[in-house]
Structure formats: C-alpha cells, structure tokens
Image (spheres, helix red, strand yellow):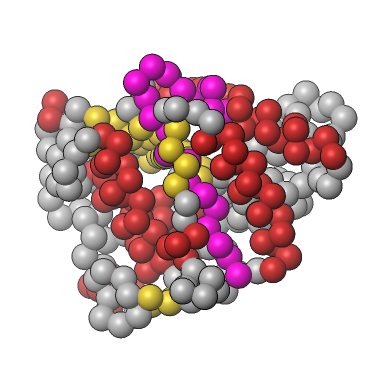
Amino acid sequence: MRNRLARALTLVPLLSAAPVLAASEPDAGAPPAALHAAPVLPAPPPAVSPSPPAAERSHTVLLLGDSLIATGFGEYLQARLEAHPRIRTARRAKSSTGLARPDFFDWMTVGQQEVQRHNPDVVVVIIGGNDGQSLKDAKGGKPIHWGRPEWEDAYRQRLEDFVKVLSAPGRKIVWLELPATGRKRFEQKLELIRGLQREVISSHQDALHVETRPFFTDAKGRALVQTRVEGFRKPMRLRMEDGVHFTVAGGRYFASKVYPEVLGLLGLAPG
C-alpha cells in the first residue's frame, strides 16, 4: 500500500537545502485542551533532483504553525516552494500549540527567533486551532478563562503582539484562515477565533489574510469531504477521521491552493 501511494505522489519532494525545524515534535506534556496533536503520515517521496545553487534563491519563505504545518500540508507546501529556483524555505512547527499557552510553548519567543535567524521575505502562519481554552502567560499569572468577556480582548492583543514580532520593513505575512472542519462544537470555537484573526490581520497593510473556506466547503457551504487532487486518479478524501487533520491527498490539495498566494506576494511566476 505504501509503495502504491508513493508512486501516486508526483509533487517535488523536500530538498536538502530546506531546513525543517522541530517539524513534528512529540506532544508529551501538551495542554489538556489541545486538539491539533499531529497524526502519523507517510513520509514524502525521496529526493529526485539536486537543489539549485543557494545564490540563485533570492527569496526566503518561513512557515510557522501547529500540527498542520508539522505534517502533510506543511511538508508539501515547503516542497512546492523549494522546487522553485528562486525560493529557499524554513519551517518551524510544534503540534498542540497556539497563542493561548506560552507556558507550554511560547510562540512569541520562537517566532522572534525564527525571523531573526532566517530574515524571511514572507512568513506563512496557520495557528489558532488549539486556542479555544483559557489564556495563560509564560510567568504563571492568573488565567483568562474561555468564555469570559475579557478573553476576546486578551486574545486580540496576543495576535497584535505576534504580528508585531514577525513584522519587518518589506516583509509580508500570509495568515491562513483555519480551515472548516465540519465538527459543529469545535466550529463554534473556531468561528470566534477566525473572526478575531481576520480582524487583526486585515488591519495590517503588510499582512494578507487568506480565506480558506472556499477550499474546503461545497457550493452549499457544507464541509468538502473529497475532491480531485493533482497526482491522484480519483477523488480523494481530504481529512483524517478526526475531521481536522489532512490526509496525504488533503495536505497536498491545501498546499496547491496556498502556493500561488505566496508566489503572488513575491512577484514570481510558477517555477
């Protein structure tokens, strides 16, 4: 089965020039409310061609996020970008994380470290699926509980702070809307988080908020279960059984939608 699946995938694989930083760290000690624990997915196919010389890669793209970046979607988006002769990439991901629990994983600090290390032209972010819980701080202060009126203001401020950490003159931020899941109770939380993210990101001139709902809903607004994906002979399921994480085909499908957005910001034609 694994051999047949590997032959079906024709996307250019991850290349040796692309650093993958903590791409799927174990979730031991993850906060109890975490919903984005990374599933185990098949590895991408082996490399088939050498990377272009580093001097030719004049643009850098940094991918940041939770398990959606750590697994298939993040891997395939990085592979697609690395296949372009003008782009180098880096990826930093940690499953079961978000902005709610810096006591568990501090994205403010990590984000600052990564942009300083790589000085990217574009930062692609998808985060927030684990944030529907009480907000804590890294110093052990009093939590702000989910559902309280002050929660929205506090989360909005964390978003502002994170955008500020990632920003620099000439740098663009691509903030991906959390994809629709089809899980009703979970969606109630995500709708609030999506709305706050859209509000904050849209207020920044150098940040692009990418709506993903059209990618994952049908004409009637229902969650898209399967669709045609490049490299597969028949329509493929997009989600795993949890309804949140992507299958191999789903990760590749999502990457194919985000890739043009990144190229557009860089002013590049497809490689």
Q: Tell me how many marks there are.
A: 0
217, above or below 195, in the image? below
In the rendered view, does 112 fall on the left or right side of 99? left
Name the residue at 53% across, 35% down: 201
Picture coordinates of residue 244 (x, y %)? 57, 63
In the rendered view, does 111 fall on the left or right side of 140? left
Picture coordinates of residue 160 (x, y %)? 61, 27
Name the residue at 56% across, 62% down: 180
117, above or below 256, in the image? above
Picture coordinates of residue 119 (x, y %)? 36, 22
Indicate the quadrant where residue 250 lies.
bottom left
Quadrant for the N terminus in the image: bottom left
Name the residue at 40% across, 22% down: 117
Say if the magenta span includes residue 51: no
As rendered, which of 113 and 47 lies closer to the eye? 113
Using the rendered image of the protein, determine whether residue 156 is visible from the camera's viewpoint: yes
Indicate the quadrant where residue 50 lies.
top left
First to last magenta residue range: 162-182
In the rendered view, does 124 fall on the left or right side of 59? right
As rendered, which of 256 and 138 lies closer to the eye? 256
Indicate the quadrant where residue 9 lies.
bottom left
The residue most toward the bottom is: 234
Picture coordinates of residue 256 (x, y %)? 31, 57
Using the rendered image of the protein, determine whether residue 96 is visible from the camera's viewpoint: no
Say if the magenta span includes residue 180: yes
In the rendered view, does 142 fall on the left or right side of 269? right
Name the residue at 47% across, 66% down: 216
